[in-house]
Image (spheres, grey):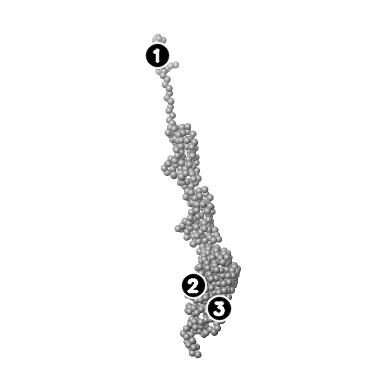
């Protein structure tokens, strides 16, 4: 049942519906207007999108390699159909300015070689590729392996040579080897070092050292790029042990072992002391023979081995030591002949072979020894005559040929050796007269001619030489002497050790003489009164 409150609304709604139906039923629909003719449709094409050109693909540098002579840059090949150009750029260091070093329009050319480069610096390379549209792309930068490895250093050592001192070092085998440099210094820290020399041959690894002083040495090895390495430091010297003493190879120039009561043979190690100039071994008890190694001492000037018990021949190898000035071999047991090679040693000033058992003649080659001052062959078994060539020794001051088996006359030519101060020809078998030329030697102080078979007169000039300190003519066959000249000479005839004319064939007995001339005058005056 419908409530009274809702009735008015219901009646209104019903009236509206009836009116609507009534309108539709009573009025026909209007006639529609004619349709207009359709206009032609123009279909416009859709616009085509314009694609802008693309830059080429980045080109990558594959490798940068080098040898001593060239550096090679290699990059990948462009696959861009519009390829136009490769441009290779280089910069030294990250912040270095770029430099174009190569252009190429050949797509297949993907390497470039540099002849000038420094691998110790960072060399950066990259490719800028361009296509036909003019667009280009730069690739990433790539460098080589930086050359920071110094060359392998050498190991240095000394090498003991026979006549020298050497250093030797291990050979560098690096491909980029450039040179060795030898340095030396007076200090082990190589302060204020001096360059000795450069060596470009890698296989040349031996150097003969200077022996004028002790130096420290070091080898610098340098490669082609200027990188350097250094060897160990060594001292250019080493010690030689002889009879418990150590001697520096370089510093030792003189050894004096006189009267040290040393027994045994002379060690051959003396021959290793390359700077040795003076060797004194006299007055010991050394035996055996002289080692040949001594003749390798190229600086040896003085060799004294007198008063020992050495034997054998005087070595011929002696002539190898051209520097020899003095040889003292006295009072030993050397035998055989004097080797003629000795007379080639032009620097000799002193020869003393006295009191040995030497035999044979005195060679006329003695004339070659123009610097000879002292010649002592006393007390041997030498035979033959006195060579006249001794007179050519213009510097000779001392001549002793006594106590041998020499025969013949005393050659007057001896007096041509005008500096002679001492002549000892005693205890031989010499004959003939005393040459007056000898009496003209201004510097003559000693004249010993005793125990020979000399004949004739004693020259008066011999008594006019007031500077004689020794005059012995005893035990000869001398026949005549001027007694007045003899006694007026002022010589001490009472001292027969120094002055003696006895045991000759004088017809009269030798007079009593006084050492002072005034005493002789008094004696003569008294004698004449009888």
Name above or below for residue 44 compared with residue 449: above
The mark found on residue 36 in the picture is 1
| Among the 4 quarters of the image, the one containing residue 267 | bottom right
- Write the residue at 41% across / 15% down: 38
Q: How far apart are the alpha carbons under marks 1 and 2? A: 168 Å
Q: Percent from the top left, x then y, of residue 481?
A: 52, 81
- Mark 3 or mark 1, which has the lower sequence index? 1
* Above or below 98: residue 255: below
> Which mark is nearer the camera, 1 or 2?
2
The N terminus sits in image quarter: top left
- Give the distance between the C-alpha atoms of the residues marked 3 and 1, in whole angstroms: 188 Å
Q: Residue at x 40, y 12 (%)?
A: 34
Q: Secondary structure at mark 1?
A: loop
Give the number of the disc on residue 513: none
Q: Position of residue 507 (x, y in %)?
A: 55, 83
* Label 3 environment density (alpha carbons within 10 Å; few <14, some 14–19, many ≥20): some
- Pointer 2: what residue? 418
Look at the image and tell me whether residue 405 can be seen.
yes
How far across and how far down the image is residue 428, in percent?
Answer: 57, 75
Tell us which disc is closer to us: 2 or 3. Answer: 3
Query: Residue under circle 3?
Result: 455
């Amino acid at each position: 049942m419908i409530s009274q409150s809702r009735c008015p609304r219901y009646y209104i709604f019903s009236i509206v519906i009836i009116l609507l139906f009534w309108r539709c039923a009573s009025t026909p629909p209007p006639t529609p207007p004619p349709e207009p003719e359709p206009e032609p449709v123009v279909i416009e094409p859709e616009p085509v999108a314009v694609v802008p050109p693309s830059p080429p693909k980045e080109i990558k540098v594959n490798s940068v390699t080098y040898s001593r002579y060239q550096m090679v840059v290699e990059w990948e090949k462009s696959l861009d159909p519009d390829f136009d150009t490769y441009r290779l750029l280089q910069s030294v260091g990250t912040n270095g300015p770029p430099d174009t070093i190569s252009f190429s329009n050949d797509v297949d050319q993907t390497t470039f070689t540099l002849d000038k480069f420094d691998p110790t610096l960072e060399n950066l390379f990259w490719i800028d590729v361009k296509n036909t549209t003019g667009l280009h792309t730069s690739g990433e930068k790539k460098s080589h392996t930086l050359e920071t490895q110094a060359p392998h250093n050498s190991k240095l050592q000394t090498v003991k040579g026979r006549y020298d001192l050497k250093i030797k070092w291990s050979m560098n085998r690096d491909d980029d080897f450039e040179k060795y440099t030898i340095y030396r210094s007076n200090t082990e820290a190589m302060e204020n070092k001096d360059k000795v020399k450069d060596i470009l041959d890698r296989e040349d690894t031996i150097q003969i050292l200077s022996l004028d002083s002790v130096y420290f040495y070091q080898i610098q090895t340098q490669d082609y790029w200027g990188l350097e390495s250094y060897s160990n430091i060594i001292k250019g010297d080493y010690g030689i042990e002889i009879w418990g003493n150590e001697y520096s190879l370089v510093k030792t120039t003189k050894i004096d072992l006189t009267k040290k009561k040393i027994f045994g043979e002379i060690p051959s190690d003396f021959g290793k002391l390359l700077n040795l100039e003076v060797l004194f071994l006299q007055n010991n008890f050394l035996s055996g023979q002289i080692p040949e190694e001594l003749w390798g001492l190229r600086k040896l000037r003085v060799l004294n081995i007198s008063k020992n018990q050495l034997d054998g021949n005087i070595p011929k190898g002696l002539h190898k030591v051209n520097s020899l000035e003095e040889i003292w071999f006295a009072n030993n047991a050397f035998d055989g002949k004097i080797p003629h090679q000795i007379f080639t040693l032009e620097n000799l000033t002193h020869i003393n072979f006295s009191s040995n058992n030497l035999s044979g003649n005195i060679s006329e080659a003695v004339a070659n020894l123009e610097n000879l001052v002292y010649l002592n062959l006393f007390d041997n078994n030498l035979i033959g005559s006195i060579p006249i060539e001794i007179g050519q020794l213009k510097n000779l001051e001392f001549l002793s040929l006594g106590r041998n088996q020499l025969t013949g006359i005393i050659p007057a030519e001896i007096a041509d050796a005008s500096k002679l101060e001492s002549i000892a020809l005693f205890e031989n078998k010499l004959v003939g007269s005393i040459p007056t030329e000898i009496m003209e030697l201004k510097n003559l102080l000693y004249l010993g001619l005793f125990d020979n078979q000399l004949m004739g007169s004693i020259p008066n000039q011999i008594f006019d030489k007031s500077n004689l300190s020794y005059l012995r003519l005893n035990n000869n066959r001398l026949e005549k002497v001027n007694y007045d000249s003899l006694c007026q000479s002022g010589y001490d005839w009472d001292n027969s050790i120094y002055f003696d004319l006895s045991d000759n064939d004088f017809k009269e007995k030798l007079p009593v003489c006084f050492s002072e001339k005034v005493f002789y005058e008094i004696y003569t005056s008294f004698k004449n009164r009888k």
